């Protein structure tokens, strides 16, 4: 099994030459995107389309933005990312439609083992993150590996999401917890 296959299976893996080259490609595209003036919309769209695995037609991603691989990220329609966000998309990172992300948010599919000896061996793991539609992330939110967030959700500013969040809810805190249920979309 290759290191990439181990990564995709959620097993411990080590960044090898293949993964290192893929990381370098994504970082080059992020650097190019971040250096491209905001009014050069077509050039910016082209770079994002080259970078991401799947992208709707309606999106706006502000600079600076960083992806680890890019191709592991899929975004739906009406996707908005404010300044200074990080997407460690070592594993799949999927967003539905109508997702709004405030400044300085981070989505981290990547992690390191608790065992110090495994960390010394430069082993890592990655677990997917899935986000439904109609979700708003307040400023500075961090979402950790393996989390699923439903649809029609608000995650309050500064929250750290370590567990799944159900649809139709507001969650805040560290760790984030549901503090309010919302009416399902179309019923309010």
Image (tube, rainbow, N blue to C red):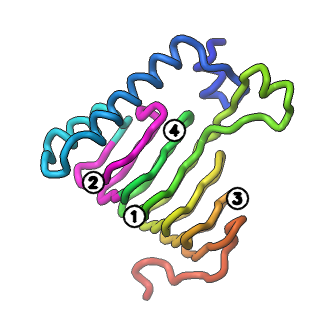
Q: Position of residue 3 (x, y in %)?
A: 63, 16
Magenta stretch encompasses residue 159 = no
Secondary-structure class at tag 4: loop
Position of residue 169 relative to residue 150, above or below, is: below
Mark closer to the observer (3, 4): 4
Left or right of residue 115: residue 14: left
Q: Mark 2 sits on what residue?
A: 59
Whole-angstrom CA distance, mark 3 to mark 4, is 18 Å
- Report the disc number at residue 184: none
Q: Position of residue 61 (x, y in %)?
A: 31, 52
- Report the disc number at residue 163: 3
Whole-angstrom CA distance, mark 1 to mark 4, is 18 Å
Q: What residue sits 67% from the left and 71% below the top? A: 173
Q: Are marks 1 and 4 in contact (CB under 8 Å)?
A: no
Magenta stretch encompasses residue 79 = yes
Left or right of residue 66: residue 48: left
Q: Mark 4 sits on what residue?
A: 89
Task: Specify which label sits upstream in the sequence, 3 or 4.
Answer: 4
Q: Which residues are magenta?
A: 55-80
Q: What residue sits 53% from the left and 52% below the top? A: 106
Task: Specify which label sits upstream in the sequence, 1 or 3.
Answer: 1
């Amino acid at each position: 099994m290759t290191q990439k296959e181990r990564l995709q299976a959620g097993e411990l893996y080590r960044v090898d030459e293949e993964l290192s080259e893929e990381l370098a490609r994504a970082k080059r595209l992020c650097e190019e995107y971040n250096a491209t003036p905001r009014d050069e919309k077509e050039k910016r769209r082209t770079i994002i389309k080259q970078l991401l695995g799947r992208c709707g037609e309606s999106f706006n991603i502000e600079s600076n933005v960083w992806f680890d691989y890019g191709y592991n990220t899929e975004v739906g329609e009406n996707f908005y990312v404010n300044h200074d966000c990080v997407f460690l998309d070592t594993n799949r990172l999927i967003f539905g439609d109508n997702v709004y992300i405030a400044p300085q948010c981070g989505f981290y599919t990547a992690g390191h083992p608790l065992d110090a000896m495994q960390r010394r061996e430069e082993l890592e793991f990655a677990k997917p993150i899935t986000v439904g539609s109609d979700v708003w992330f307040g400023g500075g939110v961090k979402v950790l590996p393996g989390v699923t967030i439903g649809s029609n959700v608000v995650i309050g500013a500064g929250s750290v999401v370590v567990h799944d969040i159900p649809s139709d809810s507001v969650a805040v805190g560290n760790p984030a917890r549901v503090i309010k249920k919302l009416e399902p979309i179309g019923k309010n």
